[in-house]
Image: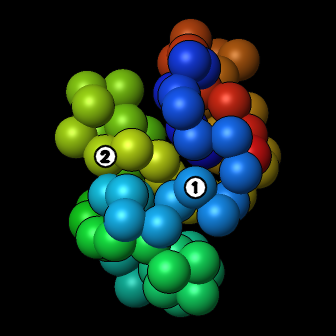
Amino acid sequence: MVPGKSPVKALKDLQNKTVGVMADSTFETDAQALGVGTIRRYKTNNDALMALRNKEVDAVVTDDVVGMYAKNKMGLDIEDL
């Protein structure tokens, strides 16, 4: 997930970016595999998504369902890659 008007348009664009994940999750492993610059770990997916909203990270690796819920029910201006 990235902010609505992010310059990040593809997974390869995450290299050298700061990415948020839920700590000790498979999302952390996924972020490592993408070769991101920095991984910031959060207690919950919602915490990671709030960090994205607050511009503390460039993207969040999470489940599509979680991201779409945040977009549709919580009103976050985010997009799926």
Give the CA distance from mark 1 to mark 2.
14 Å
Viewer-closest of 78 and 64: 78
Image vertical order of residue 55 relative to residue 16, above or below: above
Report the quarter where the N terminus lies: top right
Q: In the figure, 68 relative to 41: above or below? A: above
Query: In this rendering, which labeled residue sits more in front, label 1 or label 2?
Result: 1
Q: Is residue 37 left or right of residue 69?
A: left
Residue 30 visible in this rendered orientation of the protein: yes
Displayed quadrant of residue 23: bottom left
Instruction: Categorize mark 2 by other alpha carbons within 10 Å: few (<14), some (14-19), many (20+).
Output: many
Q: Is residue 74 above or below residue 15?
A: above
In primary-sequence order, the first of circles 1 and 2 is: 1
Spot occupied by residue 70 in the image (x, y as percentages of width and height)? 59, 29
Q: Position of residue 22 (x, y in %)?
A: 41, 66
Residue that badge 2 annotates: 57
Residue at 32%, 58% (x, y): give it: 18
Local SS, label 1: helix
Residue pictured at 27% horizontal, 31% vertical: 55
What residue did someone put label 1 on? Answer: 13
Direction from residue 64 to residue 26 in the image, left or right? left
Q: Amino acid at mark 1?
A: Asp
Q: Which quadrant would residue 67 be assigned to in this image?
A: top right
Q: Residue at x 54, y 32 (%)?
A: 7
Disc tally is: 2
